[in-house]
Amino acid sequence: MNNRGNGNSFFWLFVLLIIFGGGTVIPLLFVLGIVLAITFAAVNSSKRQESISGGYNRPAYGSSVANRGRYSASQMAKINVYLRNWFRTRKSLPVGTSVSLRVHGERYASLASLDVYRNGTYISSLSEFGRRYPESYDEILKELIRLAENRAEPEVVYEGEYVEAEPVRPKEQKPKEQKKPEPTQAPKKSAQYFIDTINSLNNSIPDEDISNGLFETCALLKQIQQLEQRFPDSKGKLDKLYEYYLPILTRILSQYDNLQAAKTDPSYEETRIKLNRTIKLINDAMKTIISNMTDQDFMNLAADISTLEAVLQKDGLTSEGTFQGSGLD
């Protein structure tokens, strides 16, 4: 179109030169000035037309092309990473008091995967929303950048069949409660413990009968200690002895030791007699315990002896206390 205009201009210039030339210069200059003015006006008009048509073809403010210039590639990448993680477990993301974004496909791929909802009502796809409402679209992108950069964790709220979530700051974790140390249990008392305790108290008791009774008590405890090692399955028969009988005896002996300074008291002799009798009772009880610890083993031994004798007699190897047919006679 511009070439045709220039051709017409030169044609009319040639015509004017023929008509008004006449060999003079001034008319020629006048004609040239008119032609240049016409050409300059045509060029300016063409530029304005291109500018106007280019303005209509320029992408909308909210389009991806415009946003590429407005937001950096790093920011858009952060948005995509944030949204991909968000929509793995959620269906909706609020970006305002009443506006939320939802994925319209099976999973989030890009911003083109999102739809815009207002108060739970579908408005349009996010791309269409950007073309219709560029300013609101820009606010949505700003909010997405803020969420992506802050990595806000959501507080999920259920609204109908969709899940709405409000991003909140990470909650402060409470310090873990330290477990209180369990009280250590006192070591279980053993025969050796009571042997040492009774011998120590016996050294302070001058009464010969009581001392002899306590010597027997320690001897019985020594025997029980050996049986514990040889017959560990019988330890359960000693629980009351260690937890009840002997602790009471040692407490009595300790009190009696403190009363040695009150021998002139009328109650002293009566107490001495009772203590002597109590020691004999505890010794008899310990003898019974010893018997109970080994009675099953003695029964088993007797049974084995009887079995062996019966087998020898059945095989004809014994007769009046001698062996027959054994080749030993």
Image (cartoon, rainbow, N blue to C red):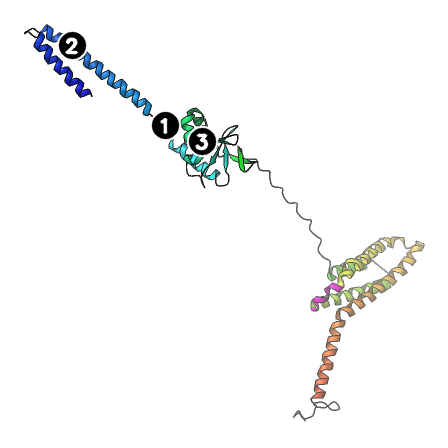
Residue 83 covered by magenta stretch: no
Q: What residue is at 15 percent from the left and 15 percent from the top?
A: 9
Say whether marks 1 and 2 touch (CB < 8 Å): no
Compared with 238, 33 (above or below) is above
Q: Is residue 208 visible?
A: no
Q: Nearer the viewer, residue 71 or 17?
A: 17
User: Residue 143 placed where, x, y %?
Assistant: 47, 29
Using a 10 Å C-alpha cutoff, classify the residue at mark 1 as few (fewer than 14 neighbours), some (14 to 19) or many (20 or more): few
Compared with 105, 62 (above or below) is above
Q: Nearer the viewer, residue 78 or 45?
A: 45
> Nearer the observer, disc 1 or disc 3?
3
Helix, strand or loop under label 1: helix
Q: What residue is at 74 percent from the left and 81 percent from the top?
A: 306
- For residue 33, which numbered disc appears in the image? 2
- For residue 66, which numbered disc appears in the image? 1
User: Residue 174 placed where, x, y %?
Assistant: 60, 38
Q: Earlier in the sequence, mark 1 or mark 3?
A: 1
Q: What residue is at 89 percent from the left and 53 percent from the top?
A: 262
User: Residue 59 placed where, x, y %?
Assistant: 35, 27
> Nearer the observer, disc 3 or disc 2?
3
| Part of the protein shown in magenta | 230-237
Picture quarter with the C terminus: bottom right
Helix, strand or loop under label 3: strand
> Nearer the observer, disc 1 or disc 2?
2
**Numbered marks: total:** 3
Q: Earlier in the sequence, mark 3 or mark 2?
A: 2
Secondary structure that dominates the magenta span: helix
Which quarter of the figure has residue 48? top left
- For residue 124, which numbered disc appears in the image? 3
Label 2 is placed on what type of residue?
Gly
Label 1 is placed on what type of residue?
Ala
Q: What residue is at 70 percent from the left and 85 percent from the top?
A: 311
